[in-house]
Amino acid sequence: VIDPLRRQKIADIPLKAHSESFQLEAVGAQIFVNVPDANEIAVLDLSTERQTASWSTQHLRVNFPLAIDKAHQQVLTMFRHPATLAAFSICDGSLTNTVDQGVARYRQARARLRNVLKRVAMIRAIALRH
């Protein structure tokens, strides 16, 4: 865990395997992390510096992009096998919805998700400057 203001490492939170995309709650202390090799989304708590939950991705594999849908209290992630957009409940990690993307639709949805994540990162960077 890196403190962006001091630009210093402030904690190490071990995971079951290599992490990919992660998202921080805008308000709160949770971090959601895609851990594709463990077939899970790890939920980390910044205040305790521990993993508090492990959400199984069930039959879905190779999850990389990740986003938080605060309005619907969901964590969204894209999977490559099968090409699927999946929604998990922030409250309990249950798989609430899936949309089969097919290969072409998967690539389009992944590009849209990356654009959203870039905009969020830009907004956060601007907010940290002020």
Image (spheres, rainbow, N blue to C red):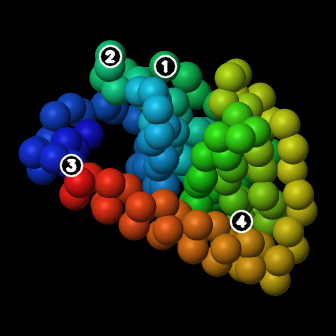
What secondary structure is marked by label 1? strand
What residue would you read off at disc 3?
Answer: 4
What residue would you read off at disc 2?
Answer: 48
Please give the label number shown on residue 80. Answer: 4
Question: The N terminus lies in which quarter of the figure?
Answer: top left
Residue 86 x/y as whole percent = 78, 50
What residue would you read off at disc 1?
Answer: 52
Three-letter amino acid code of the residue under disc 1: Thr
The residue lying at 48 percent from left, 47 percent from top is 23
Up/down of 107 relative to 62, above or below: below
If you read the primary sequence from the N terminus, does the residue marked by circle 2 or circle 4 appear first? 2
Mark 3 to mark 2: distance in Å? 18 Å
Mark 4 to mark 1: distance in Å? 26 Å
Label 3 neighbourhood size at 10 Å, few (<14), some (14-19), many (20+)? few
Question: The C terminus lies in which quarter of the figure?
Answer: bottom left
Residue 111 x/y as whole percent = 64, 77
What secondary structure is marked by label 2? loop
Label 1 neighbourhood size at 10 Å, few (<14), some (14-19), many (20+)? few
Mark 4 to mark 3: distance in Å? 31 Å
Say which of 117 and 21 sits in front.
117
The residue lying at 74 percent from left, 80 percent from top is 108
Three-letter amino acid code of the residue under disc 2: Thr
Residue 62 x/y as whole percent = 64, 58
Up/down of 96 relative to 36, above or below: above
Farthest-out residue, front: 130
Mark 2 to mark 4: distance in Å? 32 Å
Residue 113: name its quadrant. Answer: bottom right
Three-letter amino acid code of the residue under disc 3: Pro
Mark nearer the viewer, 3 or 2: 3
